[in-house]
Image: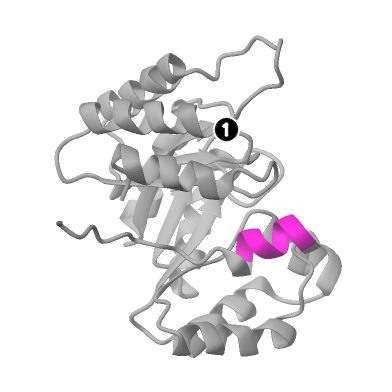
Amino acid sequence: MAKKFIDIMDTTFRDGFQSVFGGRVLMNDFFPAVEAAKTAGITHFEFGGGARFQSLYFYLREDAFEMMDQFRKIVGPDANLQTLARGVNTVMLDTGSKELIDLHAKMFKKHGTTTIRNFDALNDVENLKYSGERIVHHGLKHEIVVTMMDLPPGCYGAHTVEFYEKTLREILDSGIPYNSICFKDASGTSNPQKVFETIQMARRLIPEGTHLRLHTHETAGVSVAAYMAALEAGVD
């Protein structure tokens, strides 16, 4: 039986903190855990961006860039350190100017980031164009996103496999440079059957050899089932 390599990113130090503690964990309290994770052989970490960037300034009185520098120092030069960006909002709560969007990519590259996962919550591909271009321009890997979620029974909305296919086709037709494609469930609510069908659809559409990822949360208690469904459907 052929073995499949699964590219796992440890999300403890960004999404874990955000989902459980609102991102409010002091760097000196968790750096020993980073050391332990490195010793355990983990080489791909999610370590900043979004709420985890803001919380350091809003609540902890710590410098997020200092945290990123120290994190890189602990894990060494070869680890893949990944952050999250909200398209043209980057790590802000409002739309950034072109100068700020460029500065975001430049500063995150300077402070140890390897890969930026770039998403728009409403799947507006226009908001991924300039932000994605600047990420690649500054020498970072660009992980472009189709945003997923699910709705309560009886609610009507756009989040169907067909809608995700439409968004993916827009990304592929846009010419935005990317290194990988991620289906990201920002709420942790997508049912595993929909995840399975969506990943199968994506595998049929994307060029052969494209690195395809799923990222979800544990909000609704279905993350493990969602990941297993995605792996069965052909996610990397």
- The location of residue 31, given as percent across then percent down, is 63, 86
From this viewpoint, which residue is outermost toward the right? 59
Q: What type of secondary structure mainly makes up the magenta span? A: helix
Span of residues in magenta: 14-20
Query: In the depicted view, which residue is nearer to us: 79 or 154?
Result: 154
Image quarter of residue 202: top left
* Quarter occupied by residue 208: top left
In the image, 19: left or right of 41?
Answer: right
The local crowd at label 1, few if under 14, some if 14 to 19, many if 20 or more residues have their Cα within 10 Å, is many
Residue 1: in magenta span: no
Residue 109, percent from left and from top:
43, 67
Q: Identify whether 73 is placed above or below 153.
A: below
Q: Specify whether residue 17 is painted magenta.
A: yes
Helix, strand or loop at mark 1: loop
Quadrant where the N terminus is found in the figure: bottom left
Q: Please state which of residues 3 and 56 is positioned toward the viewer in this rendering.
A: 3
List the residue tagged with mark 1. Answer: 190
Q: Amino acid at mark 1?
A: Ser
Residue at (31% x, 25% y) in the render:
201
Q: Residue at the location (70% across, 75% down)?
A: 63
- The reply, left or right, for residue 20 in relation to residue 129 is right
